[in-house]
Structure formats: structure tokens, C-alpha cells
Image: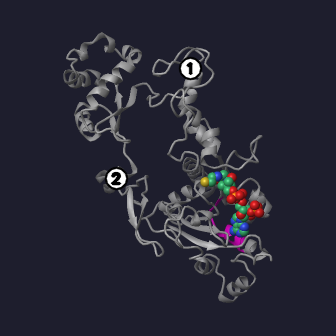
Amino acid sequence: MEALKGVRILDMTHVQAGPTCSQLLAWLGADVIKFEPPQGDATRGQLRDVPGADSLYFTMLNCNKRSITVNMKSAEGKAVFADLVRQCDIVMENFGPGVLDRLGFTYEKIRELNPRIVMGSIKGFGSTGPYADFKAYENVAQAMGGAMSTTGVPDGPPFVTGAQIGDSGTGLHLAIGLLAALHQSQRTGKGQYVEVAMMDGVMNLCRVKFRDHQRLTRGPLPEYSVPTHQGMGAAPRAGNDSGGGQLGNAIRCKPGGPNDFIYVVVQEAVWEALAKRIGPDIGQPGLATDARFATIGERRKNQSLMWELIGEFALRHTKREFMAILNPLDVPCGPIMSTEDLANDEHIRGRDMYVELDHPQRGKWFNVGMPIKLSDSPAAIKRSPLLGEHTDEILAEVLGYDAAKVASLKAAGAFTAPPKKA
Ligand SMILES: CC(C)(COP(=O)(O)OP(=O)(O)OC[C@H]1O[C@@H](n2cnc3c(N)ncnc32)[C@H](O)[C@@H]1OP(=O)(O)O)[C@@H](O)C(=O)NCCC(=O)NCCS
């Protein structure tokens, strides 16, 4: 049985942050009703690769959901929304600040309609504090949550990371909050409001950078290859330094293309074996006993030279060959995998992490699979819904509306956009 079977979610979320969360909950078995404005989630039409078809931006974030369109700016649409709130366990949204309040549905109002409902909200900066009124997208959250200032090379500009820590990262945080509140509501009959600010979520993911921030007040950070000093105000950008207790770096391999790198962690326990293996090949037969690298402290001090020597060896091998040399030595390492590498990777396919789906408008396409594996409840991934595909089904099955009621609501414009003013 699916773990969340029987849990019904009214999902008003759009773009990426919210849909990431609701897609995961759908993969865990919840009945997710994607509640869309008549023109649909804006991402349906964004970055379109197939004319007239829902974009991959949409399809990849909205699998296993049902779609209903409702015009919340009509009285009839609001009534449908209120009825759905009464029938759901969770309602979730990630509109700009104040949007739902302006539509007449504050949390207090929603709680009145259904006291046991859990309400989840994602905001750029939360509902309190000086930034509360601002909208946010992924990179704004990365900028303001500490990620950008600590990503990049020391004398270059700050960089965003490709992992969507602002949007998808916040969606993950929300999923945890929703499940906790749902568990409580099922025991007490009382729901609550769960809020995750994207800025807070990114800051949480940058936790170890605040470890370094505080350590800087006591002295330099010896594990960084860039100079850091006592009294330095902020954790610096440190390129590809591991930033942890073990030394690590990205090393260029043969034939020198943009992704011909391998990330190597010179864990304390593996140095001797590693040095014995690479030393002779690069004219350093005594590397394993070289005093400059004998202890982790020495290796930290001389890490630039250590990376140079490992790099000399790496340039004679491809990233896969180097991985095959390092794995038997128990050296933690990973070739830099491009999206192309991953899309064709046997391990990834074997773990259902890149799954082929069909779609009535676009034909075959791929989605990244479900990363959370439950032993008895594996996710069965199904395509995203077309806009309003399940409107009639939801009105009948979830709300019990009869054909006459649906017809009169349709005539009143509850599910369609009002005509544009001339
Ligand atoms: C992402 C974001 C910047 C997009 O901004 P936006 O496109 O201007 O959209 P908003 O959420 O501010 O507003 C949505 C509008 O659609 C309207 N709308 C939403 N659902 C509707 C429905 N079913 N029927 C009618 N209108 C609807 C809202 O009433 C609102 O209109 P208003 O501006 O007249 O109040 C903003 O939603 C935001 O900051 N969200 C919170 C942070 C977040 O999640 N960001 C990451 C997204 S990946």
C-alpha cells in the first residue's frame, strides 16, 4: 500500500518550490489535487520545447497529480474552493505575499472551514520581518540565504549553484513540516499552519558555513586552500575545497573537457595507500613517507602541492579510469557527472532515477525519479495532468456535485477565465 494512501491534498502551488513538495507527496501516495487558475500554472507555457505541449518545466514537477481549474476571482469559484478545503487533509500554496488573503482566504478562514486541515505556505522570506512583503525566485533565495556568498572562487564573483536549493530545497523542508503537522492533526483533530521561507531553507542548507563563520573569530581555517584569518568577517568562497574535516578537491582528468574532472577526498585513512599508488608513476616513489604530507596537518599546510601531484597523475587517466584506480584503495571519489552522463548511467537507470514516461501532447519524455525509496511502498510514477483534465471527475467524486450543479457553475464561469475587458 502507498504510505500516504487516503491523504488528500489541495495543491494551489505553482512554479517549482511548492510543486516539488506536492509531487513527492503524490509519489508517496497522496491524492494531490492541483488547483489551478483557468489559464493554468504559468510553467505549463514556460521554456516550451514542443509547440502547444505542456513544458518539461511543468511535466517534471507535477506528476501523479489531478488537475482542476477554478476561477478564484468569482464567487462560485471561491465556493468550490471552500468545499474542497472541507474535503482535504492538507492545503498548500506558494503565492506571493498576501495573495490568498486578498482572495478572502486567510489561514483563520481556512481553519474555520476545516479545523483539522494542515496549511502549508512557502514564501520568499516568511510572513514576518522586514522582507516579508517581497517576492522571491530560486536565485534570490540563494543570494539571500548565504549560498551565493560562499560559492565560487575567492577572487571571482559569487555564483549560484545548479542544485535548486532555493526552490526544490524549500519544497523538501515543507514536506517534512506538512507530514509532522498531519501526524499531529490525525491524533488531535487540530491542524496548524506550516510556513517555510526560502531564505530560511537555504540558510539551513548552508549550516556548516556558519560553523566556519564562528570559527573564524578564533583563528584561520586550516582546511581551506585560500587564506583565511582571525577577525575575517565572513566565511569565504573557497572554490572546490571540501570545506569539511577531510581534504578534497576537483581534479582535472584526461582528455581535459569541461566535465573531465573527478572529485577526490583525501581521507586521513587513505593517504598512505593513495601515495604509494600514485607516487611511483609521477616520479615521487617516496611520496608515502614524504614529511610534507605525513600528517593531515602537514597535508593541509601543503595541500596546493598535494593537489598538483595528484593532478599530474590524474591527467594520464580519464575520470572513469581514475575512479577505477581509487575505488579499490577505498578513496572516496566521484567523477563529475554531466546531465548526459547521468541520463545514460546504468546505476541511475537501475535505481529508477531517470524514468521514461509518455504524454498525450509531447510523446516520450524523461523525469528524474523518486529519490526516497520505501521498501514496501515504491513510487509508481505517472505523467502530469493536462490543464483541467480532472475538473469534472473531482467535482463529482470529491465534492459529490451532480450534473445540474456542475452545469450551472460552469455557466457562471467558476472554472474559466473571465472574458478580457475590451
Ligand atoms: C513565484 C512568484 C514570484 C510569482 O509571482 P506572480 O507570478 O506575480 O504570482 P503571485 O503568486 O504573486 O500572484 C498570483 C496571482 O494569480 C491569482 N490567482 C492564483 N490562483 C488563482 C485562481 N485559481 N483563480 C484566479 N486567480 C488566481 C492570484 O489571485 C494572484 O493575483 P493578484 O496579483 O491579482 O493577487 C510569487 O508567487 C512568490 O513570491 N511566491 C512565493 C515564493 C516562491 O514560492 N517562489 C518560488 C517559486 S518557484
Query: Picture coordinates of residue 397 (x, y %)?
Result: 59, 79
Residue 90 part of the magenta-drawn span: yes
- Residue drawn at x 40%, y 25% as measured from the top left: 246
Residue at image mark 2: 348
Which of 415 and 109 lies nearest the eye of the viewer?
415
- Marker count (numbered): 2
Q: Is residue 124 above or below residue 50?
A: above
Figure quadrant of the C terminus: bottom right
Query: Picture coordinates of residue 123 (x, y %)?
Result: 68, 50
Figure quadrant of the N terminus: bottom left
Q: Mark 2 or mark 1: which comes first in sequence?
A: 1
Q: Quadrant of ligand 1?
A: bottom right
Label 2 amino acid? Ile
Residue 165 part of the magenta-drawn span: no
Residue at image mark 1: 215
Query: Picture coordinates of residue 78 (x, y %)?
Result: 75, 71
Q: Is residue 51 above or below residue 301?
A: below
The image quadrant that residue 386 belongs to is bottom right
Which of 38 and 123 lies nearest the eye of the viewer?
38
Label 1 amino acid? Arg
Q: Secondary structure at mark 1?
A: helix
Which of 18 and 46 lies nearest the eye of the viewer?
46
Which segment is the magenta one? 80-92
Crowding at mark 2 (Cα within 10 Å: few <14, some 14-19, many 20+): some
- In the picture as drawn, the residue positioned furthest to the bottom comes out as 404
